[in-house]
Every structure is written in C-alpha cells, then in structure tokens.
Amino acid sequence: MSEMTSPDLGRRQVAERLQQGNTFLITAHRNPDGDALGSSIALARIAEKMGKRTAIVVRDGFSKPLHNIPGADRVIVSDILPPDYPNGIDAVFTMECPEHERTGFPVLPGPVVNIDHHLGNKMYGEINYLDLEAPSVGEMVMQVNDLLGVPMDPEMATAMYISLATDTGFFRYSNTTLRAFEAAEKLVRAGADPGQISLWINESVTSGSVRLLGLCLNTMEIVSQGRIATIDLPQRFFGEAGATAEDTEGIVNYGRLIDGVLVSALLKEAEGGCRVSLRAKPGVDVQAVAATFGGGGHKAASGCFIPQPMSEAKKTLVGLLERAIGR
Ligand SMILES: [Mn+2]
C-alpha cells in the first residue's frame, strides 16, 4: 500500500497472483467503456489460457459497438456479484477504478487487485498496479502478459487494441505516446485488425444514438468567451430519440471539436441531480473540478454527479470550470 509502489513492482505482483490463484473475479467501473471492457476481457483470456477460472461481472450495460469486442458476450451485467462471492475467489481484479466504490459493487477488503492508470487512485488493493503513464489499462494487461509469456492470440490482441484505441481517441489524444504506438505494433502483429476494429467501434452505433446526438447538439451553449461548451441531455430525449442509456457514449466530445473551446461538459439529467461528463483540451485539469463533487478521472476526461437540477448544476459547474481555466 506504500506510495513508493512502482508500476514494475505492481506488474510483477499481478503476474504472480495470476500464477498462484485459480479462480478470479474481474470487474470494472460503472458504465464500462472500451478500456474497462477490453482490459477485463484480455485479462480473463490470459488467465484462462493459464488454466484458471474467471468471471467478468460489471454493474452496467454498454454501447452496441463495444459488444463487438470478441469475448464481450461473456461479460455478465448484474446488480450483484456472484452469489458465492467472496468464497472460493482467489482475487478480485478491479479494472480502471480509482476507488473500489467505482465498481458499483460492495467489493470487500481482501485479495483485491487494483489495476489502473488514473490520477488520484486510492491504492485500496492488496496489490496496486498503478501506471499513470500507461495509455490504457489494456496496455498494462499486455505488459503483465509480457512477464507471463502466455502466447497472444488475435482475440486477446483485439481486446487490448480496442482498449488502447478507445482510450487514445483512436491515436489522437495526448496519451498517444511512443509507448502507445509500440503497444499497437505488438497487437497488430498478434492479429488485431485496425480497419475492422474501427468499423466495429466507430461505425456500428444504433440509429437511436445518432438521433440522440442530434437532439443533444441542439442544446449546446458556448459560454465564457467561447472557452466552455455545455450540452444538455434531459431524460425525455431518450424517448424522443428511441435511445437507451448505453447510447450516450461520445456525445460530450462534440463540444471539444470547436476551435477555442477548452472544456466540453455534458449534463445528463438523473435522479436527484445530473451526471456530468467533462472533456478538456491540454492545459486544463477537469479532474480537479470533478473531484470537488466526489468524482474523478483524468485531467482531460472526468465525470461526477452534481445533486442539483440541470440549470442550477450548469451554473455551479461553469463557475468552477472558469476558475479551473483561469483568467
Ligand atoms: Mn482507461
């Protein structure tokens, strides 16, 4: 639990735990994205190739494109952990969760293996493999596998590639480092197909999600001398668009497309307040803003819940964002 824990030590400990245990539970953060799912599926596949038993359980459903990840059909979406939990489980892997609460499950203390690349991770695991430089958690899993030497197959490589591609915005964001390209090279060599994966992820959304995007874009406001874009998603839009909760992926990014906009915020109406997604251009830290409401994420991509009605929450949020931007 020491703050001195280096990624190298964490990686070794994760590899050892996979070798020593037999039955593993893998979970990830609520509203799982491409990295949460890609890293979970890749880890399960590695463990299974080692002859271990695994189950992947996440709290919320996910967007249609992510169902194209080979192995997505084995991800269990459930409000509860398996009935035998924690009996007979040698480790619970929490993928991409800065706090164990982020899983949405009552994860008990004990053999928790925390694998993450988020700033502000609480180091709550028995093993904490935290690598802030990692382009994605799936890339961290790839590095664990490099230690284990399990032969990479195309399915495993595809899950890891999807984690890498989605977390780097398909190799556009500032985490698109040399390390990200080095990982991509390995994964393509192992059978990941970038063109096919892009079709699966970028061009396989539901019609409802595009209609929902249209409704949301019409609400966009650009404030604070063009530096902040806000987008509203009231509950009624779901019915009007024929969309589901899984269809909101990526809407927040549209504000950031605009020249001069430094932060884009999506405010989703929810029970007792709004769920907020924040995306920033380099130089602005939205993680700090999300943290004031108990949320978190990365400097460039964070989320939180504001217990206020939409219009009020927007005012509060814009005030804090203006301070984060400065001037
Ligand atoms: Mn990630």
Image (spheres, helix red, strand yellow):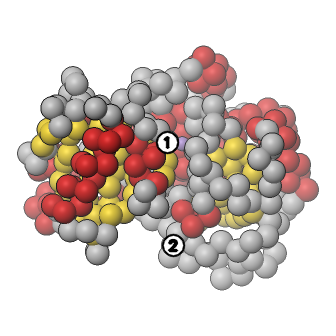
For the N terminus, the quadrant is: bottom right
- Which of the two residues, 45 or 273, is positioned nearer the viewer here? 273
Q: Residue furthest bottom?
A: 83
- Which of the two residues, 274 or 227, is positioned nearer the viewer here? 227
At a point 54% along the width and 33% down the height, the residue shown is: 164
Vertical arrangement, residue 300 with respect to residue 239, above or below: above
Residue 177 falls in image quadrant: top right
Q: Residue furthest right?
A: 20
Vertical arrangement, residue 123 with respect to residue 283, above or below: below
Question: Which SS class for mark 2?
Answer: loop
Residue depth check, mark 1 versus mark 2: number of the one nearer the observer: 1
**Residue 117's spot in the image, x, y percent?**
61, 42
At a point 28% along the width and 53% down the height, the residue shown is: 317
Residue at label 1?
298
At a point 32% along the width and 42% down the height, the residue shown is: 323
Q: Earlier in the sequence, mark 1 or mark 2?
A: 2
Label 1 CB-ligand 1 distance < 8 A: yes
For the C terminus, the quadrant is: top left
**Residue 269's spot in the image, x, y percent?**
23, 65
Can residue 237 be seen here? The reply is yes
Q: Which label number is shown at residue 78? A: 2
Can residue 67 be seen here? The reply is no
Question: Which SS class for mark 1?
Answer: loop
**Which quarter of the rendered image does ligand 1 occupy?**
top right
22 vs 261, left or right, is: right
The type of residue carrying mark 2 is Ser
Cα distance between the residues tagged 1 and 2: 26 Å
At a point 40% along the width and 49% down the height, the residue shown is: 289
**Residue 4's spot in the image, x, y percent?**
81, 42
Q: Residue furthest front?
A: 327
The type of residue carrying mark 1 is His
